[in-house]
């Protein structure tokens, strides 16, 4: 696949749209301007890649809408060197955005097909992350605690294990709701025992599934 001037022009237009919708973190916009989103989508969706929409990526899953990616990333306020846990690697696009911002990323995916595909793709684009295949509900305590945790699937509730893997001062961004729609939450760990939760509007994600992984 190639990244042409046409694609770059479309990305410029997309970042303009995101800005209008309220994304004002210049570093997030710069990452979106730089990363060829069409590389993360199946051939055939190439021409649609810079629309502000979610698209199928296989295994019944979707690549999140660029606005959603930008919104969640902006909420995380990534600092260079932040240790970030991502639940739901999917296409790997959100992973690439986090890496562009200088995060050290640990990412978990429960669909084997997507886990394998995104790992190969990101390596081919010279992005380095730690990829794990499995269920993200329990997080990844071995590598924690984390500065930031992002969940990119709609969760029925906020998993205690994820809260417990945040550093004090750390931020968890997670959409919570049913399969129709979810409310975005930012959860800040203000002390060892206290968390401050903020509601940030409605979104729509594929569900965060619990239990057995598919092969
Ligand atoms: N950030 C991704 C979003 C993909 S959609 C992107 O923009 O491409 C959400 C992903 O979460 C799907 O790939 C789905 O398989 C995965 N997922 C759902 N439940 C999960 C769980 N319990 N653990 C890990 N990944 C999960």
Image (cartoon, helix red, strand yellow):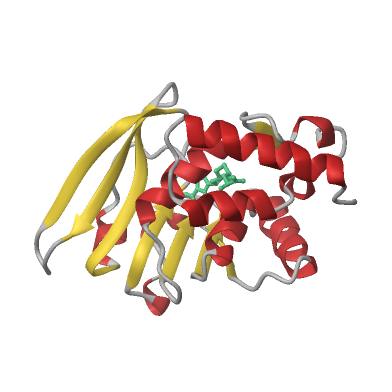
Choose top left, top right, bottom left or bottom right for residue 7. Answer: top right
Residue 118 to residue 210: above or below: below
Looking at the picture, tell me which residue is in the foreground, 89 or 97.
Answer: 97
Q: Residue at x 42, y 54 (%)?
A: 150
Horizontal side, residue 151 vs residue 89: left or right = left
Residue 132 to residue 112: above or below: below
The furthest residue to the top? 180
Image location (x, y in percent) of residue 102? 52, 71
Horizontal side, residue 179 vs residue 1: left or right = left
Residue 66 to residue 53: above or below: below
Q: Residue at x 50, y 37 (%)?
A: 19
* Residue 63 visible somewhere in the drawing: no
Choose top left, top right, bottom left or bottom right for residue 61. Answer: top right
Looking at the picture, tell me which residue is in the foreground, 131 or 149.
Answer: 149
Image location (x, y in percent) of residue 63? 63, 40
Image location (x, y in percent) of residue 196? 15, 51
């Amino acid at each position: 696949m190639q990244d042409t001037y046409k694609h770059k022009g479309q990305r410029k237009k997309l970042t303009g749209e995101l800005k209008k919708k309220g994304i004002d973190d210049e570093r997030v916009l710069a990452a979106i301007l730089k990363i060829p989103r069409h590389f993360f989508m199946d051939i055939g969706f190439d021409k649609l890649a810079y629309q502000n929409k979610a698209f199928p990526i296989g295994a019944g899953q979707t690549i999140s809408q660029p606005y959603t990616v930008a919104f969640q990333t902006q909420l995380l306020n990534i600092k260079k060197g932040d240790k970030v846990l991502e639940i739901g690697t999917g296409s790997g696009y959100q992973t690439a955005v986090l890496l562009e911002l200088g995060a050290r990323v640990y990412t978990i995916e429960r669909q084997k097909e997507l886990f394998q595909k995104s790992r190969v793709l990101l390596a081919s684009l010279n992005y380095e992350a730690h990829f794990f295949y499995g269920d993200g509900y329990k997080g990844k305590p071995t590598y924690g605690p984390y500065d930031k945790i992002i969940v990119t699937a709609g969760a029925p509730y906020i998993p205690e294990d994820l809260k417990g893997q945040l550093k004090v001062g750390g931020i968890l961004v997670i959409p919570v709701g049913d399969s129709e729609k979810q409310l975005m939450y930012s959860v800040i760990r203000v002390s060892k025992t206290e968390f401050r939760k903020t509601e940030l509007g409605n979104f729509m994600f594929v569900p965060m599934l619990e239990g057995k992984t598919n092969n």
